Each structure stands twice: as structure tokens, then as C-alpha cells.
Image (tube, rainbow, N blue to C red):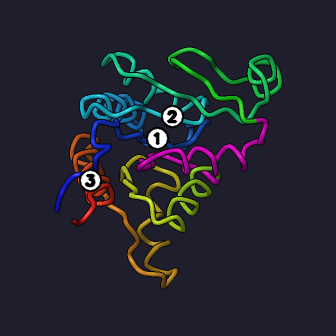
Amino acid sequence: MKPSPHSHLKFKIAVSGAAETGHCSADALDKAKELGREVVRHKAVFINGATTGFPYWAAIGAKEEGGFTIGISPASTEREHIERYDLPVDYMDMIIYTGADYSGRNLLLTRAADGIVLGCGRMGTLNEFTIAFEDKKPIGVLTGTGGTADLIQEIVERSHRGPGNIVYDPDPKALVDKLIELIRKEKVIEI
């Protein structure tokens, strides 16, 4: 196998999780920050839904590590992003305003990424997971963080669709290492 002639391009890793984190595990936000740091340590571009909660804390970690962050917003403009959706603009180097509301934003977020990591989540996180699953994207699930992230393995098993392109781990570093390996397998061209 030979690497792609475009191997200089950085991987793009999306972080998905709950915007409201009251149901998350006690250490979920600390793990989110470490997850963001790990994405950057792998020289990847960090992407999230330009939102609060778990993805926001992951963005903080990414920026603390000196990474480049991109937010994909459900809003049409910065004003709408702040005033209508009540979403933050800090810890983002760039925000793409989709005007596609949450469901459209979720589709664009997952499609823009080479791989997606899920932490403590709710219904939107599950939506992003199912999009990534159907698209056969590499997916990492940070187990032990609460919410839908801790249900994914059972959902996959009960759905009778195969295991998917998914890795699971409660440790952010180990999870990102595993996800990067999945992404590399997707990016290599056989010659």
C-alpha cells in the first residue's frame, strides 16, 4: 500500500456531544478537554457544532493545545448564531454559518469530517452518530461519559447492521489513537 498523494492534508476530526451536560458523568467535561487536546496532538483539525457543553469543552482543550478549530453553526449569520441560537463564538478560529438549523448542521458537520468522536450526548449526538454510521465514517465513542454515548454499543448490536467502523474507549488518548488508525485505513490507496 502506498499513501495518498494528498497525504500532506490534515485529518479533520469532529467532536460531538451534548450541549446541555447535566446528565453527563462527573468527569465528562474534563475528558472533553483532554479529547480536544488529543485531536490537536495528532496534528488534526478540530471541528464541532459551534455549540456549548461537551463540544465546547473539547474546543477549549484543542485551543489550549494550540490547535486550529472550526465550528459548523446551525445559524445563517453570526448575529443569528449569538442572538437566536444563543451559541458561543469563543475558542473557534473559524465558524461556518450554514443556515441549515440543527439537523442540517449535523449532516454538514459529520460529512466535513474524516472521523467523528462522540462523548456524553443527547438526541443530536445520536443523530450525528447515525449519519456517520450510514456514511461508514470512522467513529470513536468515549464510553463512561454518560447519555447516548454510553448507549451506542447496545444500539449498534440491537440494530443488526454489523459493527460499523467504530472504536470504543473510556480514555480520550487511547480513543483518539484508535480513531486515527481507522482514518488512516480509510485514507490509504492500494496501488
Residue 105 within the magenta-colored segment of the rendering: yes
Is 97 displayed left or right of 188 in the figure?
Answer: right
Q: Earlier in the sequence, mark 2 or mark 1?
A: 1
Residue 59 horizontal/vertical position (percent): 45, 26
Q: Name the residue carrying label 3.
A: 184
Disc 3 and disc 2 in contact, CB within 8 angstroms: no
How far apart are the two marked residues, 1 and 3, measured between alpha carbons? Answer: 18 Å
The front one of 191 and 15 is: 191
Residue appearing at x 52%, y 64% in the figure: 135
Q: Name the residue carrying label 1.
A: 15
Is 179 displayed left or right of 174 in the figure?
Answer: right
Is 64 displayed left or right of 134 in the figure?
Answer: left
Residue appearing at x 38%, y 75% in the figure: 163
Instruction: Specify the label residue 152 is tagged with.
Output: none
- SS for callout 2: helix
Count all numbered tags in the image, as a single digit: 3
Q: Earlier in the sequence, mark 1 or mark 3?
A: 1
Q: Which residues are magenta?
A: 99-123
Residue 88 within the magenta-colored segment of the rendering: no
- SS for callout 1: strand
Q: Amino acid at mark 2?
A: Pro
Disc 2 and disc 1 in contact, CB within 8 angstroms: yes
State whether residue 66 is above or below residue 130: above
Q: Amino acid at mark 1?
A: Val
Query: Quarter-wise, where is residue 95 in the image?
Result: top right
Location of the C terminus by quadrant is bottom left
Graded by Cα atoms within 10 Å as few (under 14), some (14 to 19) or many (20 or more), the crowding at tag 1 reads many
Q: Name the residue carrying label 2.
A: 55
